[in-house]
Image (tube, rainbow, N blue to C red):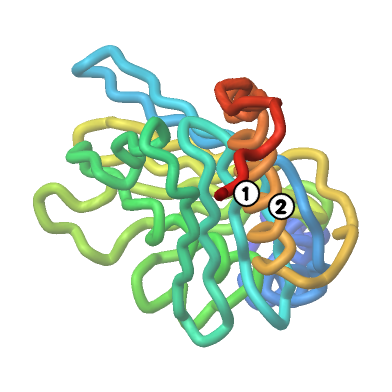
Amino acid sequence: MNRLTCGLLLAMMPLLAQAATPEEWQTWQADTPAFQSRVEQSRWLPEAETRVHADGELLYTPTQSLAWQWVTPQPRIVALDMTGQFVELTPDVPELSVVPLSETDDGLPEERQVIRLLFQLLQGNLSALRERYHLLLDGEREDWQLILLPRDRSEGALKKVAVEGGRFIESLQFVSAQDNELSLTLSDPQPPVEARGAQLLAESLTTDTIDSTDTTMQGDDSPDHSASAGPAASDD
């Protein structure tokens, strides 16, 4: 080995030493505190030249649950708890009965699959991630990117998932075999007002629905003036 080669190796050693490992990333994620943030979801279907949006709020409590409160296109709450159980709450309002984003045939994951994966990412659950993906990590604590390459290479399988973040996860992008894209963006993370997880969002959705219903019915609450205002008749 000549001096030039040795010099190059010595120069590269600090860079190699700084390369983060999935295990280090796991410790970063394990330190993620409870937080709430805005969440936006966008599906791009190039063949149909269509983009579908949804937005709302997300509440993550490390030892309890991951809960999403969608505001559009349909007010609903979807929550996943530590046992792997899903709970979905939708106001019983006929005009809100639209087709959910999960009912699509675009080669992209359904809503619950996205939620489950995000929960695993927030927890830094390497064992669960490695069961289904090859992991490629680049960056450092404050600015990193994780590429998930599905082990399932069958026709129609997902092509890749790109995750970016720093102290908090900032975005996920799913790309299907048909080049359809699903993007999830988390922004403005804040400490939660309360650490009651999905229950807090459920109460919020219920209150919003009741307020909306009361406002709609105010016009039907006018007094009935059809009854006589005179004295009641007596039986002789």
How far, Cα to Cα, is label 1 from label 2?
A: 34 Å
Q: Residue at x 62, y 66 (%)?
A: 66
At mark 1, the secondary structure is strand
* Above or below 44: residue 3: below
Res 145 label: 1
Local crowd size for mark 1, using a 10 Å CA cut-off: few (<14), some (14–19), many (≥20): some
Mark positioned earlier in the residue sequence (1 or 2): 1
Q: Horizontally, is 49 left or right of 217 in the view?
A: left
Question: Looking at the rendering, which quadrant does residue 215 occupy?
Answer: top right
- Residue projecting furthest to the left: 155
Could you say which is closer to the camera, residue 213 or residue 128?
213
Kind of residue at badge 2: Ser
Q: Is residue 62 above or below residue 20?
A: below
Image location of residue 132, percent across then percent down: 34, 71
Frontmost of labels 1 and 2 is 2
Q: Residue at x 37, y 37 (%)?
A: 94
Q: For the residue labelled by badge 2, is the local secondary structure a helix, a strand or a loop?
A: helix
Residue in the foreground of this view, choosing between 63 and 1: 63
Which residue occupies the foreground of this view, 200 or 154?
200
